[in-house]
Image (cartoon, rainbow, N blue to C red):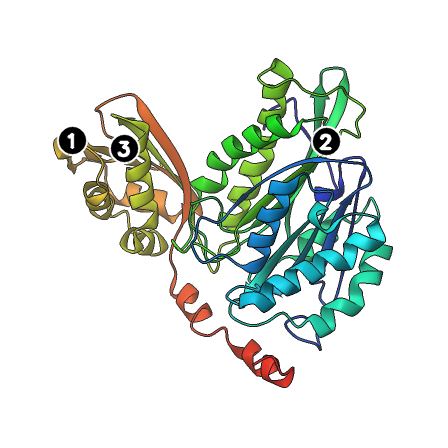
Amino acid sequence: MDSSFTRIKGGVGAPQGFHTSAVSCGIKNPASDRLDLALIHSTVPCSSAGTFTTNRVKAAPVRVSQSHLRKGDLRAIIANSGNANACTGVQGITDANAMCDGVAKPLGLKRSEIGVCSTGVIGLPMPMVRVEPKYGELVAGLGPKNGSDVAAAIITSDTRAKEVAISFDLGEHRVRIGGCVKGAGMISPSMATMLCFITTDANVPSECLRKAVLECVEESFNRITIDGDMSTNDTVLVLANGASGMPALRRNSGLCKQFRAGLHFVMLELAKAVVRDGERVTKFVTVKVEGARTYLDAKKVAEAVCKSALVKSSWNGGDPNWGRIIHAVGYSRARIREELVDISIGGKAACIGGLQADTPMDDLREAVAAPEFEIVISLNQGDAGYVMYSSDLSPEYIDFNRSEYAYWKQARKDGLV
């Protein structure tokens, strides 16, 4: 961790001027009292930026939030878990707008100042009959110390809530950045396959914030993969309200770059937390590609290796099968020469010049047996590189994902299908 950043508590509610709240609606299960509806609100005007799934099948909340960001800046975010409100047609758009309206009026905001996000089962209408009665409680519960509740309310198949907050000096002012993320399955790097909300009390104008968000997402959430599946609901939203009292940052200034470093730190920590909490994963693997001719070649190699079911299965079994790695390198469509490829696992040579290295196999097995290890693939053709973070693929992942449709029984009771 950069010594200039101090970890603090509070998650997305840590920065000054942000109030948060979460309540239980029983969206997926009316008998459950787990938190599943959350609200983030800035008490003062914000600049805002976001990135969204590149999947051509986009959930209604994604379409609504994209539309709102095009109109101006957001001041609040309402989010739910248990239902993705995806593939729900016109009714889905109506319900997403209704969620915005439900908190906009009591907060004194316009609908377009609200971002809306959903995560959960795809293809079922939102059970608005259980959501709408909770708006009053959600707004009334807003406070400066409820950030962890937001992190808990947005999780689905996650095993734990994931949040990070830091403080650091930016010029003459102490500023804070806080965030939370959900994601454990349907994780593939093409924006960011999860929901992520980040707040900061730094004074970052919209243009500067948008550039920083795009760059930091590319270097964090776009570098992770668990199962190679891209969701319909991927969203990263960042709000900056300037409540620290600092003057506005100037684009490309030294302070702007310093803010970007803080934002990158938070995003990368959250991205890594998603991989570590992947559905039934047992290994966290960093894959570094070095010596590629171009950045794109390096990216192609890293993605091919990190998405390979064969490679990921060998990681789960503790098998240092570098042959599976080099075969993925070969089909990646990157420009490579087999006789130049070197591969190391856990700092130990597995392949040199496309051939088996003389490292004892027991040493390589020991490296792959660790819960976290690094693979370095040297193409030895240039200076470009790329880093990704991945996981293994376990039998338990398959068992876990064989059936998700118990919720459909409840949906029938609610008259939604």
Q: Which residue is mark 2?
A: 176
Q: State which quarter of the image contains the C terminus.
A: bottom right
Q: Residue 119 location, x and y as percent?
A: 58, 60
At horizontal 45% and vertical 58% (from top left) the residue drawn is: 57
Horizontal side of residue 390 vs 174, given as left or right: left
Q: Amino acid at mark 3?
A: Asp
Disc 1 to disc 3, C-alpha distance: 18 Å
Earlier residue among tags 2 and 3: 2
Q: Quadrant of residue 342?
A: top left
Res 132 seen here: yes
Image depth: mark 2 or mark 1 in front: 2
Q: Which residue is mark 1?
A: 353
Instruction: From the viewer's side, name the closer residue of 49 and 63.
Output: 63
Earlier residue among tags 2 and 1: 2
Q: Residue 316 location, x and y as percent?
A: 36, 55
Q: Residue 277 location, x and y as percent?
A: 53, 53
Q: Amino acid at mark 2?
A: Arg
Mark 2 surroundings: few (<14), some (14-19) or many (≥20) residues within 10 A: many
Helix, strand or loop for disc 1: loop
Q: Which residue occupies the extreme bottom position in the image?
A: 413
Q: Amino acid at mark 1?
A: Gly
Disc 2 to disc 1, C-alpha distance: 48 Å
Residues marked 1 and 3 touching at CB (< 8 Å): no
At horizontal 35% and vertical 42% (from top left) the residue drawn is: 367
Residues marked 2 and 1 touching at CB (< 8 Å): no
Mark 1 surroundings: few (<14), some (14-19) or many (≥20) residues within 10 A: some
Earlier residue among tags 1 and 3: 3
Res 158 seen here: no
Vertical position of residue 68 compared to residue 240: above or below: below
